[in-house]
Each structure stands twice: as structure tokens, then as C-alpha cells.
Amino acid sequence: MQQTLADVLTRWEIPFRRVSGRDGEIKLRCPFCVQRGHPEDPRFVLGVNVYKGKGHCFRCGWKSTSAVTKVLKAFRIVVYGGVVGDTPLTAEKEQIVKLPADFTSFRTILRERDNM
């Protein structure tokens, strides 16, 4: 089953906008702006033509003729030979959280309540 860029972005919960009147054009928040020294920007300034594969950020000036693959990699989505995998480029390490000594789980509270 083939996936469109919009399918992948939706699956990975990456916000984007379709450009009305322009089939195959989408706008994203540019992942390259921060890499180029700009502060984060909530606007959708990176335009990508999914048919031509071209992309251009109207803020930081990033552009590419293979934008789809580069954008997915920037969002840590692995692409193998045009197939989008389910594994981020760098897996996050599990974070161990230390709870306070007097912490009581909700499950324990319910169990104690039910035993009363």
C-alpha cells in the first residue's frame, strides 16, 4: 500500500496545510529554520510540491529538489528506498522517573477502597 506525504504527516501527527487551488502543494512548519539559526515559528512557511518533489522555505530560504525525503528525515521519519518506515532516525531512550517515597498509585488507592 502506497502512502502520500499527507498520509505520513497525518500518521506522525505533524501539522500541515494543503494549499487550496494547487493540487499536490502542502505547507509545513519548517524544520530547517531552527537549524539555520531562526527561532521556532508556528507559521506554515515551508512549501512542498509532492509531485515534483521540490520544496522551499519562504522564511529561512531552504530549498531542495528532493524535499519530500529531506523533510521526512528532518522530522525523524526513516525512508528506505521510497518506503516510509515506522522507526524514528534516533530512538529516544526511556526516561526513568523517580517518584517520591510517599507516592501511591491510583490503582493502589482503588484497591484499598474496594477492600474496605
Image (cartoon, rainbow, N blue to C red):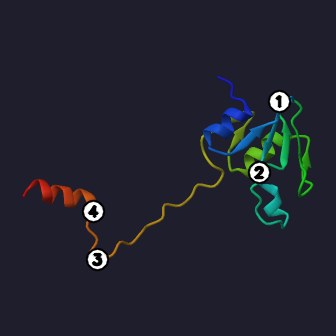
Which quadrant of the rendered structure holds the C terminus? bottom left
Nearer-N-terminus badge (2/1): 1
Q: Amino acid at mark 3?
A: Ala
Nearer-N-terminus badge (2/4): 2
Q: Nearer the viewer, mark 3 or mark 2?
A: 2
Element carrying mark 3: loop
Distance (Cα) linking label 2 and label 1: 17 Å
**Residue that carries the numbered disc 2 in the rendered image:** 29
Residue at x 42% of width, y 68% of height: 97
* Quarter of the rendering containing residue 18: top right
Nearer-N-terminus badge (1/3): 1
**Residue that carries the numbered disc 1 in the rendered image:** 24
Distance (Cα) linking label 2 and label 4: 39 Å
Element carrying mark 1: loop
**Residue that carries the numbered disc 3 in the rendered image:** 101
Q: Decide: marks 3, 4 in contact (CB < 8 A)? A: no
Distance (Cα) linking label 1 and label 4: 49 Å
Distance (Cα) linking label 3 and label 4: 12 Å
Q: Decide: marks 3, 2 in contact (CB < 8 A)? A: no
Q: Return the x and y of residue 55 as percentages of the image width and height.
A: 88, 43
Distance (Cα) linking label 3 and label 2: 42 Å
Distance (Cα) linking label 1 and label 3: 55 Å
**Residue that carries the numbered disc 4 in the rendered image:** 105
Element carrying mark 4: loop
Q: Return the x and y of residue 9 as percentages of the image width and height.
A: 68, 40
Q: Residues within 10 Å of mark 2 (few under 14, many from 20)?
A: some
